[in-house]
Structures are given as C-alpha cells and as structure tokens.
Image (cartoon, helix red, strand yellow):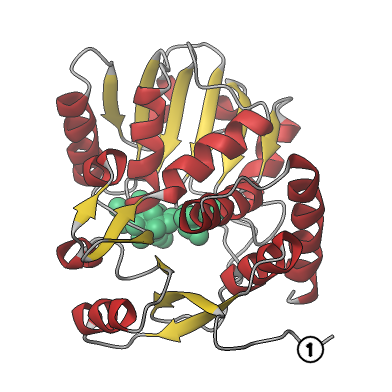
C-alpha cells in the first residue's frame, strides 16, 4: 500500500554521518503507520554545517529529529533548551520542537533504562561492572547512579578515560561509590554477583567473535548482563556470560525504546505495550534480513 503524503504530512528524521545503515526510519515509519499518524521519517546525511542543518530543519517546520554519530555532543550548541539528564550526560540524540528552536533529550539513557527494566537486568542495589567509557557508557554510568546501584566499576581500554568518567559521575552523585579499574584489575574485583553493561564497540559486526574481557574469572561473577550491541544478536561477551551460568541480553530493545521514547515526545502520545512487542519482532526480522 502506498502511504498517503499530502499538505499536512509532518516530517521527522535522523541526522548523522554515516547514516545509510540506520534502522530508525524502519522504527518510526512503523510507529506512524500503527498509530495512524500522518508522519514520515527519513535519514539526512549531514556531512558538515550541523548548526545550519538544525536551523534549516526548524525553519522547514520539521517536527522532531534524531541525532547520531558523530554529532551527539556538538548539536547541544544549537538548541534552545536541554533536558537535565541529557545535559549531565553531555549528549543529545533527540530534538523536540519547542518555541524558538529545539529542546534536546538523551533517549539512549531512557531507552537503556526501559530495556533493562523490561528484560529484568537489575541495577537497584547491585554492584555493576561497566565496560567502556565512551558516549553510551556515560549514559549507562549515569543510569547506574540514578537507579541506585550499590557501586560501579568502570573497566576501559584507556584507563584515563575510565577515570575521567568515574570522576564525573562522582561529581554528579557525591554519595555514589564509583571507581575505574584496568582490564587486568577486573579479574580481582571483590567476589559478588555483578550486573554487567557492555558499552564498547568490541564484538560488533563485522568484527564479531571477540570481547575485550578475556579473564574467565570475571564471567563467574556476572549473573545478569546487557550488551548494547545488537548486531550480531549474540555477541562473544553475551556467550561467555551464558557459558559461566549468567543471563545476557543484547541492545536491540534499547534501540527500540530510544526510538519509541523520541516518538512519544514528538507526538505527545503513549505507544501501547501490545504494539511494542509486535514492533520488536518486526525490528528483529528487519535486522536479520540485513545480515
Ligand atoms: P564511543 O563513544 O566511540 O566509545 C567507544 C568505547 O569502546 C570506548 O570505551 C573505547 O575505549 C572502546 N573501544 C573502541 N574500540 C576498542 C578496542 N579496539 N579495544 C578496546 N576498547 C575499544 O562509542 P559509543 O557511542 O559509546 O558506542 C559504544 C557501543 O554502544 C557501540 O557498539 C554502539 O553500537 C552501542 N550503542 C548501542 C545503542 C543501542 O541503542 N543499542 C545506542 C548507543 C550505542 P577507549 O576509551 O579506550 O577508546
């Protein structure tokens, strides 16, 4: 069936570089169709002049935008307002149209929280092992502190970046115990049942089958884990957690929920639970068809 586009069709989209492999148009156009909204969502390959792109989108009455790599921090300079969590994390991936410009949100943060809750990966009162110290890890670390995890260990290839992230979280949440450790130190952490969050690029398609955490002793201590990677559907990290007797899930629900949260913000609607299940199944199928 051909979608009816007319003079009242609203436009949303995603800006990034590169952008060709984004799954966001799939998610948002499926949502618009299901919710019966006259809205289309497209990908914009913004190679340069990000500030002009944001201004242009506003002038063209674009309802909302997602922003992806490499612009999640830079875009903050072009906004009229920024949600508190996004400001603290230092990254915006969703622009919501308000008077005079766009307000920025970090729906990766909300999406990760929603996905972990639904998949039963616990943060509250748990010790957490976070792999990575980049943009996604920062959102995850902020989530751990705001969801009352017991303590947080940040393990990153570049220890200085892990330490900088730990210092930043300690500044935002002065009572929260957070520490950066090197990869070799990870095997000698206190023996307890950790929730682990894998937030590096290691193991992502096409370089699957590897993990940066190779010490078997660490996996014995992980009882629940999420890998933010969703391609492949089961990463080496997830396999090793399972082999050691733990439970692990991938990042596809986080992707879904960062999109759904953005859609709900743009349209002031609540997407029904029953459709979320259907959309998740469709998204999985779409990802498999792309290899
Ligand atoms: P980023 O800011 O570039 O950070 C990359 C992280 O991976 C850093 O900690 C970096 O360590 C580490 N890393 C990269 N290459 C490495 C290597 N060869 N050996 C060891 N460590 C390495 O990226 P990001 O935006 O945080 O994304 C991280 C992951 O999260 C990606 O896989 C991305 O697809 C995923 N993600 C998923 C969702 C979702 O919706 N499911 C959303 C956002 C991100 P150094 O500090 O040492 O460089």
Q: Is residue 127 visible?
A: yes
Q: Quadrant of residue 153?
A: top left
Count of numbered circles in the view = 1
Query: Within 10 angstroms of label 1, few (less than 14), some, or many (20 or more) residues?
Result: few
Q: Is residue 221 left or right of residue 141?
A: right
Q: Is residue 155 above or below residue 206?
A: above
Q: Tell me what residue is drawn at x 60 percent, y 39 percent.
A: 115
Q: Is residue 1 left or right of residue 89?
A: right
Q: Taking the image as four quarters, which one is ligand 1 found in? A: bottom left
Q: Quadrant of the N terminus?
A: bottom right
The image shows residue 48 at horizontal and vertical percentages of 25, 87
Q: Tell me what residue is drawn at x 21 percent, y 62 percent.
A: 79
Q: Tell me what residue is drawn at x 71 percent, y 67 percent.
A: 30
Q: Tell me what residue is drawn at x 36 percent, y 24 percent.
A: 146
Farthest-out residue, front: 7
Q: Nearer the viewer, residue 24 or 129?
A: 24
Q: Is residue 229 above or below residue 206?
A: above
Q: Nearer the viewer, residue 237 or 253?
A: 253
Q: Nearer the viewer, residue 199 or 146?
A: 146
Residue at image mark 1: 2
Q: Is residue 182 above or below residue 70?
A: above
């Amino acid at each position: 069936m051909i979608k009816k586009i007319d003079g009242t069709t609203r436009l949303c989209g995603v800006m990034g570089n590169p952008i060709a492999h984004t799954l966001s148009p799939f998610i948002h156009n499926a949502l618009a169709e299901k919710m019966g909204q006259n809205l289309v969502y497209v990908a914009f390959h913004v190679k340069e002049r990000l500030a002009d792109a944001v201004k242009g989108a506003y002038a063209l009455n674009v309802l909302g935008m997602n922003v992806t790599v490499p612009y999640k921090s830079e875009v903050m300079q072009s906004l009229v307002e920024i949600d508190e969590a996004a400001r603290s994390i230092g990254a915006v991936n969703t622009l919501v149209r308000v008077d005079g410009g766009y307000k920025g949100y970090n729906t990766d943060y909300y999406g990760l929280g929603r996905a972990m809750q639904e998949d039963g990966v616990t943060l509250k009162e748990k010790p957490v092992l976070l792999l990575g110290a980049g943009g996604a890890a920062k959102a995850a670390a902020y989530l751990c502190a705001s969801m009352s995890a017991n303590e947080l260990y940040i393990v990153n290839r570049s220890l200085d970046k892990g330490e900088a992230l730990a210092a930043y979280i300690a500044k935002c949440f002065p009572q929260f115990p957070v520490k950066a450790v090197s990869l070799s130190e990870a095997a000698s952490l206190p023996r307890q049942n950790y929730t682990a969050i894998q937030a590096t690029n290691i193991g992502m398609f096409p370089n699957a089958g590897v993990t940066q955490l190779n010490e078997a002793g660490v996996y014995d201590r992980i009882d629940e884990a999420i890998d933010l990677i969703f391609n492949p559907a089961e990463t080496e990290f997830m396999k090793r957690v399972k082999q050691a007797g733990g439970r692990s899930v991938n990042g596809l629900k986080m992707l879904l929920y960062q999109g759904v949260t953005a859609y709900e913000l743009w349209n002031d609607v609540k997407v029904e639970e029953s459709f979320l299940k259907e959309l998740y199944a469709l998204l999985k199928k779409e990802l498999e068809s792309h290899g």
